[in-house]
Image (cartoon, rainbow, N blue to C red):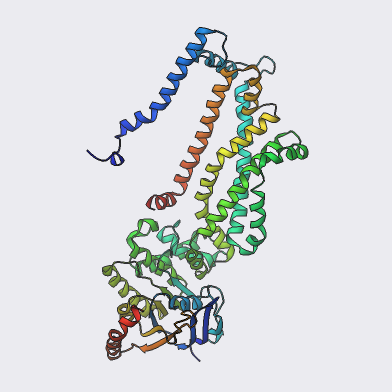
Amino acid sequence: MSFLTIDDVWKSYADVQILERLTLKVEQGEFVSMVGASGCGKTTLLKMILGSEQPTRGRIQLEDQPISPEPNQARGIVFQKYSVFPHLSVLQNVMIADEFTAARFLGRTFGKQKQQIADKAIGFIEAVGLSHAIHKYPHQLSGGMQQRLAIAQALMKSPKILLLDEPFGALDPGIRKDMHQLIHKVWKENNLTIFMVTHDIQEGFELGSRLWVFDKVRHDPQAPTAYGAQITYDLALNSEKQQQAGQTLAKKYAKKVVNL
Amino acid sequence: MKKLMNIEPSRPLKGFLALLPFVLILMLYWSASNERLAENPYDKLLPSFSQISDAVERMAFTEDKRSGEYLFWVDTGASMYRIGLGIGISAMLGLLLGMLSGLLPVFRSGFSPLITIVSLIPPMAVLPILFISFGLGELAKVMLIIIGTAPVIIRDVQGHVRQLPSEILIKAQTLGASTWLVAIRVVLPQIMPRLIGAVRLSLGTAWLFLIAAEAIAAQEGLGYRIFLVRRYMSMDVILPYVIWITTLAFVMDFSLRKLSELCFPWYHHQEAGK
């Protein structure tokens, strides 16, 4: 009995096989980094866990229940961009998460209830380091600040799973370091289970407690789309030693994975 | 010396250049009108400025002998009522149906082909049907404006809803929003400035259909008056009416733009940044 079970999942679009034979178990509190070449299906797997895509074959179970086939509160998401609402201020962007559930008809709260939600929202805004920009709109924020805001939004619902789709891909290297610290802190403090798709293998090793490497095992030169990618390495990175062993392995395979 | 494409005029020069064509047209008109009137003082084609101001005085600031009304203002009121009602209903329809079909695939499947076909019907071709079924009263004229503008606004709003990044809609769902809440708290506020933009673009069409309908069947209205006095070749009335209609159209467009900038500053910043 695992927290999340991926049971013989295949995914294809028309004739194009994206993923095949994925069978994996993830325990609560793990931080899974997913790396691989562009178009190898790591984002597709993320979307299937999110519920915005369905597996062609196989099934995904969350706490022994089939995972909901549409996005819901159990799974939070931070995309690379467009993750925040452009028409709302920072505070409103975070408050709306609780207002959705507190007011099923208007989606707005008033008076005491509103104050409670605002207090909770301010707590998360402080946690991601945005207290100085609380009344600004997303277009006034830098890329890194927008991602911080998106994380604060997701934390409001205390999701069982937090999904990160290349969350730092559009950021400068310096800011990326800060964001790594933030996400590590958020992961530990909220006891989250995180899945992160990244292009940056280094990032995958530094952040995760577990690393999945996506690659195609079977090739048909006549029909390059006939076979999908599988997870070729499933590495635990819990301890320093394992991490170092993994880094060596990564260096060995980085070229292959990235230049595929 | 900079390349021509890189030369920005200074502010005063910009103002001067903007006014220049208007001044030139006025001067051209004035000299042509003088010339014709010198030849034939009863010429009606290019009335002088004093004749035009007499006509304005007569239409706008003198009671009509027969009805005791100020015709110019009666006409303005009637036309503004029709175009306001028509474009208002079109905007409401556009918002409602555009959002429904943009957000709900089930609704879109049934509705989208219909609206595509309806938007291809030339509205003037159904004008006789409107007059037959709704009579010659206000309803037929307002209906013509609605038929002429609503399909375009609906399709525009639908397109804008579908262009909202899917990430935004998925994010809202992961925060616990229902379809209804996504519609009113995520889509509606983001679509409002785009609706105003669509309405601004449809104003020209709305005026076209208003004046056409008034020309054919009405007892008052700016379009009605122009076509009525055409029989007497009263250019001294037609010209100020045309200028007045243009002014009204400009004011409506300008105030919608200002309203949008006032209510949705985030949208205009975002667009300017693109």
Q: Is residue B98 above or below residue B219?
A: below
Total residue callouts: 0
Residue at coordinates 39% horizontally, 56% vertically from top-left? Answer: A137
Q: Is residue B130 above or below residue A138?
A: above
Compare residues B244 and A157 and report the one nearer the observer.
B244
Q: Nearer the viewer, residue B100 or A84?
A: B100
The answer to whether residue B22 shows anywhere in this view is yes
Q: Quadrant of residue A140?
A: bottom left
Which residue is found at the position 33% from the left and 73% from the top? A182
Residue A135 appears anywhere in the view: no
In this rendering, position of residue B233 left or right of residue A174: right
Q: Is residue B116 above or below residue B105?
A: above
Residue at horizontal 30 percent and vertical 85 percent from the top: A250
* B93 sits left or right of B256 in the view: right
In this view, the residue in front, B88 or B38, is: B38
Q: Position of residue B149 (x, y in %)?
A: 61, 44
Expressed as whole percent of the image width and height from the top left, the position of residue A169 reads 35, 70
- Residue A163, position as x, y percentages in the image: 44, 75
Please tell me whether residue A249 is drawn above or below residue A43 in the rendered image: below
Report the residue that reaches farthest toward the left.
B1
The answer to which quarter of the image holds residue B159 is bottom right
- Give x and y (percent) for residue A142: 33, 60
Q: Quadrant of the C terminus of chain A?
A: bottom left
Residue farthest toward the front in the current orientation of the protein: A222
